[in-house]
Amino acid sequence: VTLIEAAQPFGGAEQLGQSEKTVGPVFTAKAFICNPDFTPSSKKLLTNGSILFVCIEPAKDQISTVITKVNYFCLNKVDEDLYFEAVYGMGETSKVTVVIGLDTREVIIGVRVPSQFYDTDTNVTGTGEVILGQQRRLLRSDIALPRYLEEETEADGSFDLD
């Protein structure tokens, strides 16, 4: 399984169809095959009935970025018409999929891969999109009151998983 990392701009004119120029910072997320404890998996092959765990995290240098939603995550077999929507319709999950860790920096998608994917020895590709949120932390200072933090969010980005 090979990861293809994709960057998506946050804000900018190209989202309005006005220009090819990127405006503002570019926020990225990476996805990788993992274990349930968010460590990279050394397993190269899945067996029928096992669960595929895909971990998604923002870039390490983007410390205020969190993942607020998984818009979609699909699996398909290379050179075949077999297609499975694990997450679809702006965050709805299939009956064999779970998404944990939303609104944090570590999201895990767990999906039981359908048995049809094991019929032939063909690579499986995963494609998806997440919404990245930005937390803006404002520290209020008033000696008589406790300190409060305010948060803000949202941007999107897609990812590919081979």
Image (cartoon, rainbow, N blue to C red):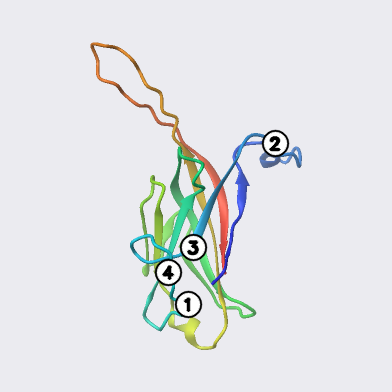
Quarter of the image where the N terminus is located:
bottom right
Q: Disc 3 versus disc 4: distance between alpha carbons?
A: 8 Å
Label 4: how many residues lie within 10 Å, few (<14), some (14-19) or many (20+)? some
Identity, as a three-letter code, of the amino acid under mark 2: Ala
- At horizontal 59% and vertical 39% (from top left) the residue drawn is 10
Identity, as a three-letter code, of the amino acid under mark 1: Lys
Quarter of the image where the C terminus is located:
bottom right
Label 2: how many residues lie within 10 Å, few (<14), some (14-19) or many (20+)? some
Which x, y percent locates residue 86? 45, 66
Which x, y percent locates residue 153? 46, 36
* Residue identifier under label 3: 32
- At horizontal 48% and vertical 85% (from top left) the residue drawn is 118
* Residue identifier under label 1: 44
Which x, y percent locates residue 80? 61, 80
Q: Does 1 sit left or right of 139 as displayed?
A: right
Q: Nearer the viewer, residue 145 or 130?
A: 145
* Residue identifier under label 2: 13
In primary-sequence order, the first of circles 2 and 3 is: 2
Q: Disc 1 versus disc 4: distance between alpha carbons?
A: 8 Å
Identity, as a three-letter code, of the amino acid under mark 3: Phe
Q: Disc 3 versus disc 1: distance between alpha carbons?
A: 12 Å
- At horizontal 50% and vertical 88% (from top left) the residue drawn is 119
